[in-house]
Amino acid sequence: MEKNEFNGGTEKVVAPTENKMGTMPVGKLLIQISLPMMISMLVQALYNVVDSIFVAQISENALTAVSLAFPIQNLMISTAVGTGVGVNALLSRRLGEQNEKGVTDSAINGIFLYAITMIVFMVLGFFIPRLYFESQTNNAEIIEYGVTYLEICMIVSVGLYGAILFERLLQSTGRTVLSMISQLAGAIINIVFDPLLIFGLAGFPKMGIAGAAWATVFGQIVGFAISLTLNLTKNKEIKFKLKGFRPHAKTIGEIYKVGVPSILLGSIGSVLTYLINLILGAFTMTAVAVYGVYFKLQSFIFMPVFGLNNGIVPIVAYNYGAKRKDRIMRSIKLCAIAAVTIMAAGLLIFELFPRQLLAMFNASEEMYAIGVPALRRIAIHFPVAAVCITLISVFQALGKGLLSMVVSFVRQVIVLLPAAYLLSLTGDVNNIWWAFIIAEGASAVASFIGMQMVYNKDLKNL
């Protein structure tokens, strides 16, 4: 909308300044927004790998305990990221519509939702860790390691939720370089303090697996502090007005319209990992450790792709609000090409160097026997996953959170878990890994059908 100004009796038409997501060339914009997130998520993946490498030096049981803790940690991250996806998509659409009040309402209600979720997990941290680990193993050492680690991560989760929230707010307005700064700082703090606290170096107490947990939460708190500061000082498009705040049901509904499916999607992943661990644990706990190692290693490939796709969410959402079909379609095409390229590189690494990758985790001969075929077989699905991840991000950006959940539900619940169970009946633990390839094929079919539906309904005549 234009506005008129009068200067000496002469009318001057002044066009409002538009966000770069509606004006910058799409290729350059995608690089500018996504590259900082890709770098920061790559560093986060690095700290996940380094964290497990250090824990593996304690013992294989310690590594197994951290692997078993992953579903709960992933559930916490899923609630935070899922809510962030909803806030991000809504806030970016409001920017595209040049709705200043809508932008502020999206941010403030997002803060409220994060606070409630964080409190829930902090309280649960006092009660569920021991019951959770005892449901998966009767190995007393693994249980004690796991309880120690998970209690700290849950009770001191303020940094996790705060960091993800305020990083997402920076991303939603296109300030991904600032988001990268806070993410990098948190990850680096974690990497530095891992060996110091685990092994008691440089005058720090030797805390073992508790040290790994404290290094993690300390890094998250630093990331939270930095991202909060950057929002308050640099993110001028969002007005953080908490005085007189009342939860706004319509805004919360819009956030959760996209956010809840994303949360459920991540939650399904947590349940799936828990059940896969039970299937693998019936063979040997070393198989559970291998699965945990795989997750850490694959994050080094997947995280940059997630960063890339996080970059297109505000771009697609903004241009959908501004009704610019050409920019939306070009964003999707460029993102898919880049994602497949990254995943293809990951496939080659997993196929050519599986023993070297496992060696970083102090692997035993049993771990090599299970891990080498696991890495090689699961990696086959990487390039297909790249396209599916891109399309799921598009669904989220367009407010089709339910569709993104359905695609993931097809992959993880309808196909992956039953396939893994049926393959386990062959009596060979290494056959279970084929389930991932089967599931990704089903996900690809569902993703393409979903994209065709979205295009015909929402984009074709935009």
Image (cartoon, rainbow, N blue to C red):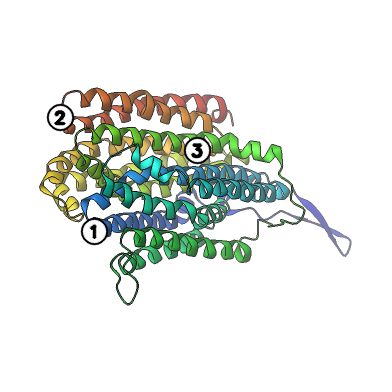
Q: In the rendering, at what x and y percent does residue 89 appear?
A: 57, 43
Q: Is residue 37 left or right of residue 363?
A: right
User: For the point 15% across and 39% down, which residue is it?
Assistant: 373
Label annotation for residue 263: 3
Q: Pick the residue in front: 186 or 458.
A: 186
* Residue 180 place in picture, x, y as percent: 46, 60
Between discs 1 and 3, the one toward the N terminus? 1
Q: Residues within 10 Å of mark 2 (few under 14, many from 20)?
A: few
Please name the amino acid that badge 2 sits on. Asp
Q: Is residue 336 visible?
A: no
Alpha carbon separation for disc pair 3 and 2: 33 Å
Q: Which residue is mark 1?
A: 58
- Tell me the mark number nearer the camera, choosing from 3 and 2: 2
Q: Residues within 10 Å of mark 3 (few under 14, many from 20)?
A: many
User: In the image, which is nearer the foreground, mark 1 or mark 2?
Assistant: 1
- At label 3, the amino acid type is Ile
- The residues bearing labels 1 and 3 have C-alpha atoms spaced at a distance of 33 Å
Q: Which residue does the image show at 31% across and 68% down from the upper left?
A: 206
Asked which secondary structure carries label 1, the reply is loop
Question: Which residue in the protein does label 2 denote?
Answer: 428
Q: Amino acid at mark 1?
A: Ile
